[in-house]
Amino acid sequence: MSAECGVRSAEFSNLAFIALGSNLGDSRQIILQAFERLQELSAGPIHKSSLWQTTPVDCPPGSPRFVNAVAGLVPLPGESPESLLKKLRELEKEFGRQPKSIVNEPRPLDLDLISFGNETRNTLELILPHPRAHLRQFVLQPLREISPELILPGQEKTVLELLAALAADETVTRL
């Protein structure tokens, strides 16, 4: 676990959690560089999970393994979930992400807004918390490192409890 880990429960309501993934190019380096760029979007030091190698979930056959991680950041003053999502999409493009031609195709960088404090959304552009985060080991395992006691809006169990109850076929290995 990195030095940035260990978010206390009082901090949860102030953080936005972003899941990072890459399975195209030098994925490990891409995630490390993305952490640096996410720091620029935070009003304080970001909380970073370890890097995890994971099997692709709901991806085209033959897709390469992913490197995944989670970051927790303090949104900048005046930031909304929608404005942060826009910045995340721009960051994906900077790292070479192209418009999707196939659902869940390999990509150099995927940034998913998992939660934004206690905010909830259900629009065409944004659903908060992320609708599948609580079902994905590749999100919950790194999220457990930095906020095991987090309860995502709409959930009753902590991240730690969700992970323990998950019956996933995924292979998730810390790098």
Image (spheres, rainbow, N blue to C red):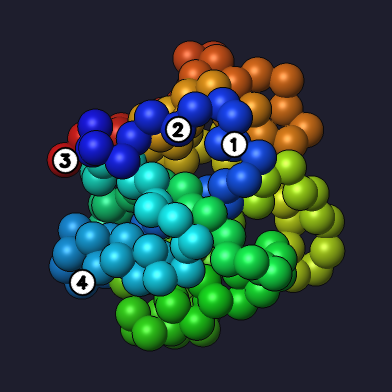
The secondary structure type at the circle numbered 4 is loop
**Separation (CA) of disc 2 from disc 3:** 21 Å
Residue corresponding to mark 4: 25
Q: Characterize the local packing of mark 4: few (<14), some (14-19) or many (20 or more) Cα atoms within 10 angstroms.
A: few
Residue corresponding to mark 3: 175
Residue corresponding to mark 2: 7
Front disc: 2 or 4 = 2
Earlier sequence position, callout 2 versus callout 3:
2
Question: Where does the image place residue 25, in percent across and percent down from the top left?
Answer: 20, 71
155 or 149, which is in the foreground?
149
Question: Where does the image place residue 53, in percent across and percent down from the top left?
Answer: 24, 44
35 or 103, which is in the foreground?
35
**Separation (CA) of disc 3 from disc 1:** 26 Å
The secondary structure type at the circle numbered 2 is loop
Look at the picture and state if 154 lies above or below 63.
Answer: above
The secondary structure type at the circle numbered 1 is helix
The amino acid type, in three-letter code, at marker 3 is Leu
